[in-house]
Each structure stands twice: as structure tokens, then as C-alpha cells.
Amino acid sequence: MDDREMTVVEHLTELRRRIIWVLTVFVLALIVGFCFAGSLIEYLKEKPIAEGVPLISLHPSDTLRVYLQVSFLAGVIVTLPVALYHIWRFVSPGLQPHERRGTLYFIPAACFLFIVGILFGYYVVFPMVMLFVTGVSLGIDVKPNYGIGEYFEFLFNLIIPFGLLFQLPILVIFLTKIRILNPLRLAKMRRFAYFGLAIVGIVLTPPDIVSDFLVIIPLLLLYEMSIWLSKIVYRKQLQEQENWEKEYAVEADEAVR
């Protein structure tokens, strides 16, 4: 009983130490992000916004709020690989050696796909949406002036979901490894998945066919890539199971003799 309690205490101590590491990195990244937030804001507000549309401050705290939002996003992006690494280190003692090696690859892949998703949302989806809503305003002879706080809130609410959507391959590989999903099941679900991803693409883009296709097609390709990756994992699982069955059959024959 004492040994068990000691083991639990050790695990909690290690968990606390790793949380402190992650929080420390996040705070440092937040401070650095705040120092460079001005340059980031200048870049973000000029690059994809509809040409000639000014940004204005509607509240005294708008600019400070945007600084904090940009700093927070920068802190999350910088801290993400550190947080995933410490999660992996915390759970890795309970994994088999091959599982430990395999799950380690999730960290750079998840970070890469998250950044790619954000860049896709920022450089592809957001400019289309801004041009569309600005065109609608001009179409009814309304001169658009966007509040800087609302503009950046709209920006982050649009691009961050794409960072999460691009985690689909990582999620599928993980669920395949724990045998909840397999490529056969994913193939059967294809039409429902296509329908769901199409709805997401239509909701997040302006109501024109070109914008819809520019978003929906990458999401569908992402799903197909997930099926392909699931096939690779599933084949390895079948091979390991076949090897285990052969080894078990040999040991059973030897025991009978």
C-alpha cells in the first residue's frame, strides 16, 4: 500500500514538474510575442484585407486587446510542441518501445499540420471572405470601416478552426493505432465524411462556387490522406498479429510434444 501511494505521489510530482515547464515556456513565449506583436499586427492587418478598407478603434482597450490576442496565439504556437513533448514523456513509460517510437512522430506532425492549417485559413480562406463581405457592403453603397478588435476576432475565429481541422490525419492515425478506426471503416464512411466536410467548407466560405471548391477540395484530400495513412498503420497491425499467431502456434506445438 505504501509503495502504491509512493508511486502515485511520484507520478503527481512529475506531472506538476512538466506542467511548470510548459507554463514557463508559454509565459516566456507570451512575453516575446507581446514584444513583437506590433509588427505582427501590422502585417496581419495589411496583407489579406480588402484594399482601401481602413481599420479603426471603437473602444479605448481595442488595441491592447488585439496585442494580447496576437501574443496569446504566438504563445500557443510556440508552446504547442513543448506541451506535446511533455505529454509524450509523461505517458511514454507505460508504452511499449515500438509504441514509444511511433507516438513520438505525432509531435512534429501535429505541429506542422496545425501551422499549415492556420496558413491555409489566412492566405486562402480569409482573403476570399474579406473580399466578399467588403463587396457586399459596397454593393449597397455602404462604406466599410472595420473595428480593429472585431476584425482580429473575426480573423482568429476563422483561421484557428482550420488549424484544428488539419489535425484530422493525426487523429485518424491515433484512432487506428488503438483499433477504433480502420481504413475499411473510413472508406465506408467516405460519403458521410465528404458531406460533413463540404458543409464545413460552405459554412466557412462566401456563398460562391469558386470559394467553396477552393476550401472543400483540400479538406477532401485531407480525408483521403487520412485513409492512406490508416492503411499503412493497419497493415503493420495485421502483420504484427500474424507474426504473433505464428509464434503462438509454434509454442503450442512444442508444448503438446
Image (cartoon, rainbow, N blue to C red):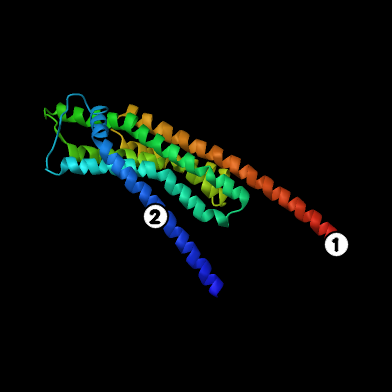
Q: Secondary structure at mark 2?
A: helix
Front-most of 37 and 215? 37
Mark sitting on residue 20 = 2
Query: Residue 256: which disc?
Result: 1
Q: Is residue 11 left or right of residue 255?
A: left
What residue type is disc 2 on? Ile
Q: Position of residue 134 (x, y in %)?
A: 19, 29
Q: Residue at x 47, y 59 (%)?
A: 14
Circle 2/circle 1 CB separation < 8 Å: no
State whether residue 142 is above or below residue 77: above
Residue 6 in picture, x, y percent from top left: 52, 69
Residue for point 31% across, 34% down: 205
Instruction: Please identify, in this view, whether the residue under mark 2 or under mark 1 is nearer the observer.
Output: 2
Look at the image and tell me whether residue 189 can be seen. Answer: no
Residue type beneath disc 1? Val
Q: Nearer the viewer, residue 38 or 181?
A: 38
The answer for how far apart the CA atoms under marks 2 and 1 are is 56 Å
What secondary structure is marked by label 1?
Answer: helix
- Disc 1 crowd, CA 10 A, few/some/many (<14, 14-19, 20+): few
Q: Which mark is residue 39?
A: none
**Is residue 94 something one can see in this rendering?**
yes
Q: Nearer the viewer, residue 195 or 178?
A: 178
Q: Is residue 49 above or below residue 199?
A: above
**Quarter of image, res 4:** bottom right
The outermost residue toward the top is: 51
- Residue at the spot x=37%, y=47% of the render? 25
Outermost bottom residue: 1
- Residue 101, position as x, y percentages in the image: 58, 46
Residue 136 position in % (x across, y down): 19, 30
Q: Which quadrant is the C terminus positioned in?
A: bottom right
